[in-house]
């Protein structure tokens, strides 16, 4: 794909994010400012920006931010963080991600060094109180009961008690104590409310909630980033500081790569004690370091076992003597639709995994095979069914066997789940994929023609109620430099290595294709935005650590753009949005993953009124026009950013800008008529009028006036002949749905 530069990049434009320079939350627009004039200025600048060529922004000085975080962690955080990770690794990893979010955010806000250090330490240790929470609560795979949730609510106070033993900093303790306190707390007493809460606590609450929503859990899949932002905005004014929420949203719009990529990966690696012993002990002892390096030699048997678990088609899990999961291979992820990070450390439970005996109904009680194995001390073999969400039940054979050693008692169990379902349709698809006419001659993955056909088929299947899918587009960094330095044969070898990594790491039913040059695509069926981004990050890490013999043993890197099908999408818009995410990844420094799009999980099914035969015959304009009010919980400047993405992905044409109105010409819909591709689309004229939402129009009572935007959309066909087409209503409904998803809003009124 030719990476055509779009005029909708955030840098050097009138719509760049404005970041406050003081250590306080950004304030809304001053009273008395003319909202219509503000919107008019923004839209006028959008028209100017659409005619300009965007320039690439300079790389962010991430190394300075990382060094600062490292210095902070060398203090009291080391031993306490190590203890928390020993107690519950998932919680410690969550604390690290939140600390990285807060570090980047504080840097953008221009906070002074002392305050920033305090916020980073508080973010890293805000969950240290979970050391005092019982394992049965922390490791529970399902949702918590009321009593268990009340126990979890004591974490901030327990954490403060732990920290008082090593610090007397009242500001640090206040951030941790109030990080779970609602901005508009209704509790009586001395609990502060609103801006009286520490700034660090208000920032930490937002970063904490965002990471929780975008992380996989057993009881809930990860949300897309846009969906998580929408949830934050809808809870602003009640649970979160509204000004900080919008500042955080602007930060993510300008720098989406800060939440996933090389920076996070490096710190996750450095926080392993075997990689940084001196960091955790605080004193670099050469003898100790040498001893640990000797112990860190990985045995060949271990490497073989790890490879075996990764390539097995059967699901395999290991548990300890208490039933807590310690290993969870890729096949088990596929069968249960639960990622390893959501299950490691959790208690293995047939009910939580939606598993039941094959001879029982869904409502019948199932005896967990793991508990039966612990009770009898013998291996348990049983035919079971996994009630997967959104798909047909999967028939499996489950075997749970105890692991015994020389000493009496059990070390744990090995659980093997064998898929018994019919895979004939999958085999036929794989046979079709490997036909020579559909393969790229160099890399032996699918070619562009086969990808285009498959993408159209998957879009059609998803629109008609099938599972959603994710699209990952990836491009090798500085590939021309590779050809110029090592020659074209070496460049071809690099392409083969990259294609092989994509092919070996893809799942059954996924499609890997070469789109052209050094650009590849991964079409992941039954996959959402968050899972696709996680897959892309794993591919990025594997590529940057794989030496290539033809390049003298050097490694190469790639940039990744990820998106998911969402309401109103066509094959062209899905591909364009993924390409826009790839361009953002390259513009923001390369060797990183950028995710865009709301995803299908927020889809709201709406009935589309059909025109009668008389309206079709007369073709009157009133029957062909649609008026929709969309309320989006973000301020007008973020609405402009989202419209910028819509225009780029739909190749829309800006017709006119007049005060607070924007006129667009856009193609929508799909039909089988006409020999030319353009005949399959209907040309529509869309007029968008932007205004600040009034108080009685807000989605929640606590929503902040001035932070929500109402977009009035009027849509009608441009050509008279299109008013009589049977596909007109579908094309209009598709465009409305697309506007709603891009604006992250809800339809509050509609007139046909």
Image (cartoon, grey):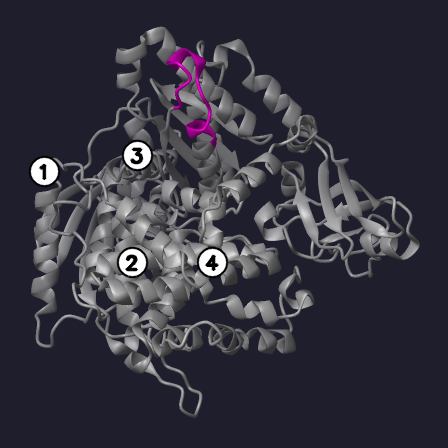
> Looking at the image, is mark 3 or mark 1 earlier in the sequence?
1
> Looking at the image, is mark 2 or mark 4 earlier in the sequence?
4
Secondary structure, mark 3, is: loop
> Looking at the image, is mark 2 or mark 1 earlier in the sequence?
1
Q: Name the residue under label 1.
A: 52
CA gap between label 4 and label 3 equals 31 Å
Residue 590 marker: 3
* Marks 4,3: beta carbons within 8 A: no
Secondary structure, mark 4, is: helix
CA gap between label 4 and label 1 equals 49 Å
CA gap between label 2 and label 3 equals 20 Å
Given residues 618 and 642, the one toward you in this image is 642
Residue shown at the point (60%, 71%) measured from the top left:
132
Eye-nearest disc, 2 or 4: 4
> Looking at the image, is mark 4 or mark 3 earlier in the sequence?
4
Given residues 336 and 458, the one toward you in this image is 336
CA gap between label 2 and label 4 equals 22 Å
* Label 1 environment density (alpha carbons within 10 Å; few <14, some 14–19, many ≥20): few
* Marks 3,1: beta carbons within 8 A: no
Magenta range: 542-555
CA gap between label 3 and label 1 equals 23 Å
Residue shown at the point (29%, 71%) measured from the top left:
242
Residue 306, percent from left and from top: 65, 32
Given residues 350 and 39, the one toward you in this image is 350
Quarter of the view holding residue 104: bottom left
Could you tell me which quadrant the C terminus lies in?
Answer: bottom left
> Looking at the image, is mark 2 or mark 3 earlier in the sequence?
2
Magenta includes 552? yes
């Amino acid at each position: 794909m030719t990476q055509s530069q779009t005029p909708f990049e955030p840098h050097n434009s009138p719509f760049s994010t404005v970041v406050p320079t003081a250590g306080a939350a950004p304030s809304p627009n001053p009273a008395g400012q003319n909202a219509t004039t503000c919107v008019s200025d923004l839209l006028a600048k959008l028209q100017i920006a659409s005619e300009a060529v965007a320039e690439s922004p300079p790389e962010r000085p991430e190394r300075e931010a990382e060094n600062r975080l490292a210095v902070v962690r060398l203090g009291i955080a080391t031993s306490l963080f190590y203890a928390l990770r020993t107690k519950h690794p998932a919680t410690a990893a969550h604390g690290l991600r939140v600390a990285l979010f807060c570090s980047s955010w504080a840097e953008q806000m221009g906070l002074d060094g002392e305050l920033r250090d305090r916020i980073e330490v508080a973010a890293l240790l805000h969950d240290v109180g979970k050391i005092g929470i019982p394992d049965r609560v922390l490791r529970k795979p399902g949702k918590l009961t009321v009593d268990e949730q009340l126990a979890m609510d004591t974490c901030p106070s327990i954490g403060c008690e732990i920290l008082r033993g090593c610090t007397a900093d009242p500001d640090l303790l206040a951030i941790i104590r109030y990080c779970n306190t609602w901005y508009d707390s209704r509790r009586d007493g001395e609990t502060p409310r609103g801006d009286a809460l520490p700034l660090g606590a208000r920032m930490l609450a937002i970063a904490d909630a965002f990471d929780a929503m975008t992380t996989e859990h057993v009881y809930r899949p990860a949300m897309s980033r846009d969906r998580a932002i929408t949830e934050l905005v809808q809870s602003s004014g009640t649970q979160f500081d509204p000004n900080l929420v919008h500042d955080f949203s602007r930060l993510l719009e300008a720098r989406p790569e800060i939440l996933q990529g090389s920076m996070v990966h490096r710190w996750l690696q450095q926080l392993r004690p075997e990689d940084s012993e001196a960091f955790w002990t605080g004193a670099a002892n050469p003898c100790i370091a040498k001893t640990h390096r000797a112990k860190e030699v990985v045995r060949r048997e271990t490497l073989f076992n790890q490879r075996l678990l990764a390539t097995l088609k059967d699901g395999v899990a290991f548990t300890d003597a208490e039933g807590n999961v310690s290993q969870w291979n890729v096949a088990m992820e596929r069968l249960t639709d639960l990622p390893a990070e959501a299950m490691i450390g959790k208690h293995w439970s047939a009910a939580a995994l939606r598993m039941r005996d094959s001879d029982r109904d869904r409502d019948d009680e199932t005896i967990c095979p793991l508990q039966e194995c612990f009770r009898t001390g013998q291996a348990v073999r049983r035919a079971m069914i996994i009630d997967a969400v959104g798909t047909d039940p999967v028939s499996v054979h489950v075997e749970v066997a105890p692991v015994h050693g020389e000493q009496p008692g059990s070390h744990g169990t090995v659980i093997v789940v064998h898929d018994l379902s019919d895979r004939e349709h999958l085999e036929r698809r794989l046979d079709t994929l490997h036909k020579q006419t559909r393969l790229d001659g160099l890399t032996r993955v699918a070619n562009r023609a086969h990808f285009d056909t498959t993408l159209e088929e998957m879009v059609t299947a998803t629109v008609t109620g099938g599972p959603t899918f994710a699209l990952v587009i990836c491009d090798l960094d500085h590939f021309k430099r590779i050809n110029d330095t090592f020659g074209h044969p070496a460049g071809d070898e690099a392409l083969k290595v990259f294609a092989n990594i994509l092919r070996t790491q893809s799942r059954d039913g996924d499609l890997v294709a070469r789109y052209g040059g050094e650009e590849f695509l991964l079409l992941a069926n039954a996959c959402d935005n968050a899972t696709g981004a996680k897959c892309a990050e794993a591919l990025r890490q594997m590529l940057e650590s794989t030496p290539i013999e033809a390049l003298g043993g050097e490694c190469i890197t790639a940039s990744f753009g990820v998106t998911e099908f969402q309401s109103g999408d066509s094959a062209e818009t899905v591909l364009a949005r993924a390409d826009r995410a790839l361009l953002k990844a390259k513009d923001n420094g390369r060797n990183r993953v950028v995710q865009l799009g709301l995803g299908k999980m927020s889809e709201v099914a709406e009935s589309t009124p059909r025109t009668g035969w008389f309206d079709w015959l007369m073709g009157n304009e009133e029957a062909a026009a649609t008026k929709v009010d969309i309320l989006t919980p973000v301020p007008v400047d973020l609405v402009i950013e989202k419209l910028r993405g819509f225009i780029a992905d739909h190749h829309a044409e800006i017709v006119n800008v007049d005060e607070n109105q924007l006129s667009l010409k856009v193609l929508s819909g799909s039909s089988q008529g006409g020999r030319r591709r353009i005949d399959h689309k209907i040309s529509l004229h869309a007029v968008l009028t932007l205004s600040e939402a009034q108080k009685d129009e807000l989605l929640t009572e606590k929503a902040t006036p001035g932070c929500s935007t109402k977009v009035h959309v009027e849509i009608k066909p441009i050509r008279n002949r299109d008013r009589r087409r049977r596909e007109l209503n579908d094309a209009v409904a598709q465009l409305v749905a697309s506007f709603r998803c891009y604006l992250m809003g809800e339809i509050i009124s509609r007139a046909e």
